[in-house]
Image (tube, rainbow, N blue to C red):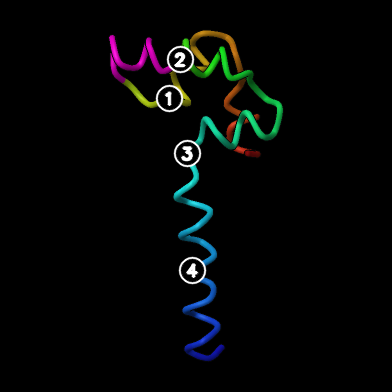
């Protein structure tokens, strides 16, 4: 593996990581935009990670998030 491969790999990983989980879940049709909005409101009020909030609300599962 050369330095260019490392840089390109890092760049690709950075792009993937920078995409918000909510956006990934919507694009994957795992949740709706409305469910994300509701989850974000709960997150703002009570705190926590958005994935955990969405699971507690019953909108998705831990398995679905892991696959996203």
Q: Residues within 10 Å of mark 3 (few under 14, many from 20)?
A: few
- Image location of residue 35, percent across then percent down: 56, 13
- Image location of residue 38, percent across then percent down: 47, 10
Residue under the image location 38 percent in, 26 percent down: 49
Distance in Å between CA atoms under marks 2 and 4? 30 Å
Residue identifier under label 4 = 11
The quadrant holding residue 45 is top left
Question: Helix or strand or loop: what does disc 4 sit on?
Answer: helix
Q: Count the marks: how many?
A: 4
What quarter of the picture does the C terminus occupy?
Answer: top right
Question: Helix or strand or loop: what does disc 1 sit on?
Answer: helix
> Which mark sits nearer the N-terminus, 1 or 3?
3
Give the residues drawn in magenta, as a range: 40-47
Distance in Å between CA atoms under marks 1 and 3? 10 Å
Asked whether the beta carbons under mark 1 and mark 2 sit within 8 Å of each other, the answer is: yes
- Image location of residue 5, percent across then percent down: 55, 83
Question: Helix or strand or loop: what does disc 3 sit on?
Answer: loop
């Amino acid at each position: 593996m050369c330095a260019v491969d490392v840089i390109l790999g890092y760049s690709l990983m950075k792009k993937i990581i920078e995409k918000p989980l909510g956006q990934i879940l919507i694009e994957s049709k795992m949740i709706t935009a409305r469910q994300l909005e509701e989850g974000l409101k709960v997150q703002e009020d009570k705190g926590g990670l958005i994935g955990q909030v969405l699971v507690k609300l019953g909108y998705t599962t831990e398995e679905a998030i892991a696959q996203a």
